[in-house]
């Protein structure tokens, strides 16, 4: 399979080398000492073969970095990016199904009073172990004080561990709990990780730094004039014309900024792409879209 056609192995993820930017593709850990890690990844990817047997990655199977906290895998076992944890919506439904099939397990756990409480953002919620075992990262991005209190009453001689760590804006918990087999605990244990943190795309905390962040970095009218040759008044007027199309992930302001920078300075599409951290073909698409819309509307003025 050629490199550009490799597609991410995660269900419902269509990321490929050729249709993505800023996404890395990782093969599964395959060294002898990485056996445990490989199993964790496989468990997280949570696929089955068409015939229902457990899925195992092929030599060419890849997983894209979009499933790792911070859009990058980490080799540090304490990092939330050690194991993929960000998955499409469909994964939630899968987990619900597996919850049903494990209802017996839950009952046993409840009997043994394994319970945890967590509080964040003034909400205090009781959540059982099952909640913690899901691999879905929480979607809320916020800055808040959060605390977790866990009360565990492990059955004698059964291996049970709970670990919680945080790094930068990411929180990660890991629970190792006994497997239940025909009503008895056996010595096999299963480990599950849950981590949460902001998606890299939603981190805008760097807006306060000095680098260029498109329209948000323009602090006054002189800067705007330097870049675009327009005043805020003209810029806003043009921007309001663009509002009729907004199917782009780049903001309306940035699209107009790109268009005007190109007109005023005639930088190459790739040079503008470097500034805005987008691909040159996106810059060119944005430019010609704006050109088309504005040329039609301005004629009517
Ligand atoms: Zn993917």
Image (tube, helix red, strand yellow):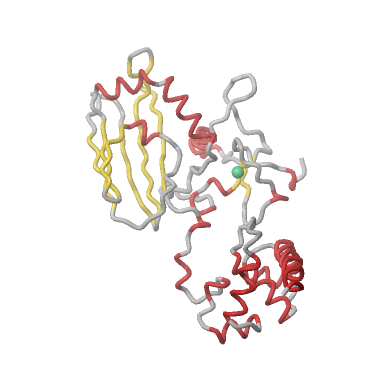
Instruction: Say which of 1 and 228 sits in front.
Output: 228
Q: Quadrant of the C terminus?
A: bottom right
Quarter of image, ligand 1 = top right
Quadrant in which residue 107 is drawn: top left
- Residue 90 horizontal side relative to residue 60, left or right: left
> What x and y, as percent, mark residue 158?
29, 25
**Residue for point 73% across, 66% down:** 293
- Where is residue 5 shown, x and y percent of the image? 74, 44
| Residue 184 or residue 244, whichever sits in front | 244
Total number of numbered discs in the rendering: 0
Picture layout, residue 102 above or below residue 119: above
Figure quadrant of the N terminus: top right
**170 w.r.t. 109: above or below:** below
Q: Position of residue 54 (x, y in %)?
A: 57, 24
Of the pair 223 and 137, the residue shown nearer to us: 223
Residue shown at 65%/60% (left/top)?
244
Q: Residue at x 40, y 21 (%)?
A: 102
As drawn, 119 above or below 284: above
Q: Is residue 16 left or right of residue 155?
A: right
């Amino acid at each position: 399979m050629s490199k550009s056609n490799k597609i991410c192995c995660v269900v419902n993820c269509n990321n490929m080398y050729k249709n993505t930017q800023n996404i890395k593709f990782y093969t599964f850990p395959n060294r002898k000492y990485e056996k445990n890690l490989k199993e964790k990844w496989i468990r997280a990817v949570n696929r089955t073969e068409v015939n229902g047997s457990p899925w195992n990655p092929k030599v060419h199977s890849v997983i894209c970095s979009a499933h790792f906290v911070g859009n990058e895998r980490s080799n540090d076992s304490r990092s939330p990016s050690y194991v993929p944890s960000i998955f499409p919506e469909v994964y939630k439904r899968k987990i619900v199904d597996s919850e049903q099939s494990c209802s017996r397990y839950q009952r046993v756990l409840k009997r043994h009073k394994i319970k945890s409480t967590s509080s964040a953002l003034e909400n205090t919620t009781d959540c059982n172990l099952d909640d913690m075992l899901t691999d879905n990262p929480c979607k809320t991005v916020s800055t808040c004080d959060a605390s977790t209190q866990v009360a565990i009453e492990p059955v004698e001689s059964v291996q049970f561990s709970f670990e919680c760590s945080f790094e930068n804006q990411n929180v990660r918990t890991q629970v190792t709990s006994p497997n239940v087999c025909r009503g008895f605990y056996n010595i096999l244990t299963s480990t599950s990780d849950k981590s949460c943190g902001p998606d890299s795309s939603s981190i805008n905390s760097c807006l306060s730094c000095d680098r260029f962040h498109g329209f948000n970095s323009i602090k006054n009218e002189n800067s705007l004039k330097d870049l675009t040759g327009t005043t805020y008044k003209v810029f806003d007027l043009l921007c309001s014309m663009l509002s009729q199309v907004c199917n782009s992930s780049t903001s309306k302001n940035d699209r107009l900024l790109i268009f005007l920078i190109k007109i005023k300075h005639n930088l190459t599409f790739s040079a503008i792409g470097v500034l805005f951290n987008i691909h040159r073909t996106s810059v060119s698409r944005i430019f010609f879209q704006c050109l088309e819309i504005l040329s039609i509307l301005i004629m009517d003025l």
